[in-house]
Amino acid sequence: MNEKNSGSRANTASKLIARVIRYMLHYYKIPFVCVIVCILITAIATVVGATFPQTLVDDYITPMLASGSKDFSGLASDLFRLACVMGIGVITAFAYNRIVVNVSQGTMRHLRDDLFCRMEALPIKYFDTHAHGDIMSVYTNDVDTLRQLLSQSIPQIINSGITMAATLITMIILNPVLTVISILTAVVMLLVTSNFSKLSGKYYIRQQIDLGTVDGFIEEMLDGQKVVKVFCHEDAAMKDFHEVNEKLRDSTNMANRYANLLMPINANIGWISYALVAIVGAILGINELAGVTIGTVITFVGLNRSFTNPITQVSQQINFVVNAAAGAQRVFDLMDQEPEADEGYVELVNAKEDENGNLQESSDRTNLWAWKHPHKAEGTVTYTKQEGGVVFDDVDFGYSDNKIVLHNISLYAKPGQKIAFVGATGAGKTTITNLINRFYDIADGKIRYDGININKIKKPDLRRSLGMVLQDTHLFTGTVMENIRYGKLDATDDECIKAAKLANADGFIRRLPDGYDTMLTGDGANLSQGQRQLLAIARAAVADPPALILDEATSSIDTRTEKLVQAGMDALMKGRTTFVIAHRLSTVKNSDCIMVMEQGRIIERGTHDELIAAKGKYYQLYTGNFA
C-alpha cells in the first residue's frame, strides 16, 4: 500500500513538474532552446578539458621523457586550442545562466499575472471558504519554490544530464572496461536518490500546507491585535502560534531529514567509484592490459568525477524539485479553480430617447441607462429602461445543498422604494442582498430586476447597476480622491467632491493634512471608523446607481454624525430603489416597507406604523418589550 502511494505521489510530482515546464515553454520556447544549446556546448567543452590529460601524458610527456626532446611547439598549439574551447565553454555557461534568469523571472511574472486574473474571476464563495493568509502563501512561498525550480533545479538537471551523456560516450570510446565500474556505481546512486526522494516528498507537501496555515494564522493575529490585547489573550495567542509553528517545524524537519542525507551519501559513493576506477585502472595500466596507459588512467579518473558529480548535484536539486512539486500543486489548485459562471446575455448600455420616447443605444455617456435584451429566437433586441425594480418570487437559498437558510422569500421593491430588513443576527438579511448581486445563486424561485430574470443579466452589468455600502468598509492604498473615485473610475474630481458633500464627508476630508490628496494606507488606519464609513458612502454616491444596498451603513457612526449622514443618505436614496439592513431601527422608520426576518423567513412586513400597531416581533424589537 505504501509503495503504491509512493508511486502515485511520484507520478503526480512528475506531472506537476512537466506542467510547470510546459507553462514556461508557452512563453519562452526559443530562449529555452538557446539554453539547451549553450549547455550542450558547455558540456562538450568540459569533456574536452577532461580528456586533455591523456593527450598531455601519452602524446607529449612520456615521448619527450624517453627521447629527451625539448620541442614544445606541438604542446603549445594544443594548449592554445584547449584555451579557445574552454573560453567558448565559459562564454556559453555565462550566456545560459543569464538567459535562465530572464526566463525564470519572466515566467514568474506571467504566473503571478495568471494567478491574479484567475483569483479575480473566482466567486465570492471561494474567499468565504479559504483563509486569506493561505491564499497569500500561494503567491509568496509556493510561487517562490517554482522560481527556485526554474532558475536553479531544471537548468542544473539538464546540465547534469547532458554532461553525463557526453562523458559516458567519451568513457565508452576511451575504455569500456573502466566505464562498467562507473555505470554500476551510478546505478547505485540513482537508486539511493529515488528512494530518498520518495521518503522526503510526502513531507514537503505537508510542509507547504503547514506553511500556509502559519501565514494564515499570522495574518489573522495582525488583523485582530486590538481584540487580542483588549481581552489580554497574548499568552493564548502565543500558545496557539507555537502549536501551528511546531507542526511546520515537524514537517520541515522530516522533509529535510531525508533530503539532507542524500547528497553526502551520493558524494561518498562517488568517491568509492573514483577509488575503484583508479585501482582497477592502475592494475590494467601496469600490466598493459585492455590498452590502458598512464594517460588513460589519469583521464578516466577525471571523467569518472565528471560522470558521478552530476548525480550528486541532481540529488541536491531533487530536494528543490520535490518541494517545488508541492508548491506547484497548490499554485495549480488555485489556477484550476472554476471561475465564476456567467451565462448572462443582457447588457447595461448607455441609452437615449428619440422623439417618440423609444429607447436607443448610444455611444455617448447620457446618464440614461437601459437593459439591452437580445431575443435569439425572434432575432430582435429590446431595450428596457433601468429603474431599479426588484422582485423576489418564492426564493430558497442555501450555502450548501443540505442546509437551506432562506425559505420562500417573496417581496417586491418598486423603483424608488426604500425596503428595510430587520431581525436578529443570522436571520438572513445580508444573504438576501448577496443574492441580488448574484454573489451566490439561488436554489429555487426567481429574482427579477426591472422585470428581467437576473440570471439573464451579465454579472458585471448587474453589479455595476447596484451601489453597495457594507458594514465592513475597505479602503485601498491611495489618496482620498482615488478611494472615492473607485465607485466610478471615470468620475471627475468635481463629481467625487460632490459625492463627498452628499455623504457629509467633505468637511472632515478638507481638515486632513492634504485634503483630498491625503494618502491612505493600511485600510485607512489614519481615519476613524466613522470617517472610513463616510468615504464608503461617498464611493457609492459617485457611482450614481439606480439601486442601493446599505448593509449597516451607519453602524460605525456616532449619533451626532448619524444625523448629518442620514440627511445625505436621504438625498442619495431619493429616486433610487434602496435595500437597507439595520440594527438601529430608528434609521428605517421612514421606509416604504419593513421586512422582519427570523430564521430565514419573512415573518412580518409593513410600514413602521403598521408593524407597531400589530404589536408583533417588530414591536418587540423596537420597544424592547419582550413580555
Image (cartoon, grey):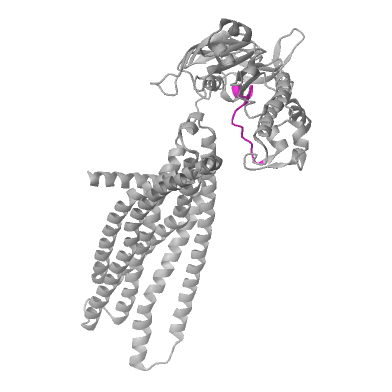
Please identify the quarter of the rendering in which residue 399 is found: top left
Q: Residue 228, percent across and down?
A: 52, 42
- Would you say residue 363 is visible in this rendering? no
Asked if residue 523 is positioned above or below residue 249 in the image, the reply reads above
Q: Residue 561, percent across and down?
A: 71, 27
Asked if residue 229 is positioned above or below residue 82 in the image, the reply reads above
Residue at the image position 45 percent from the left and 51 percent from the top = 145
Q: Is residue 351 left or right of residue 611?
A: right
Please identify the quarter of the rendering in which residue 259 is found: bottom left
User: Which residue is at the front of the view, 162 or 583?
Assistant: 583
Q: Is residue 448 magenta?
A: no
Residue at the image position 52 percent from the left and 62 percent from the top = 95
Q: Residue 519, percent across and down?
A: 70, 42
Q: Is residue 475 magenta?
A: yes
Residue at the image position 68 percent from the left and 16 percent from the top = 576
Q: Is residue 375 left or right of residue 161?
A: right
User: Which residue is at the front of the view, 342 or 480?
Assistant: 480
Q: Is residue 531 left or right of residue 330?
A: right
Give the magenta-colored segment's residue range: 461-477
User: Which residue is at the front of the view, 597 or 50?
Assistant: 597
How many numbered discs?
Answer: 0
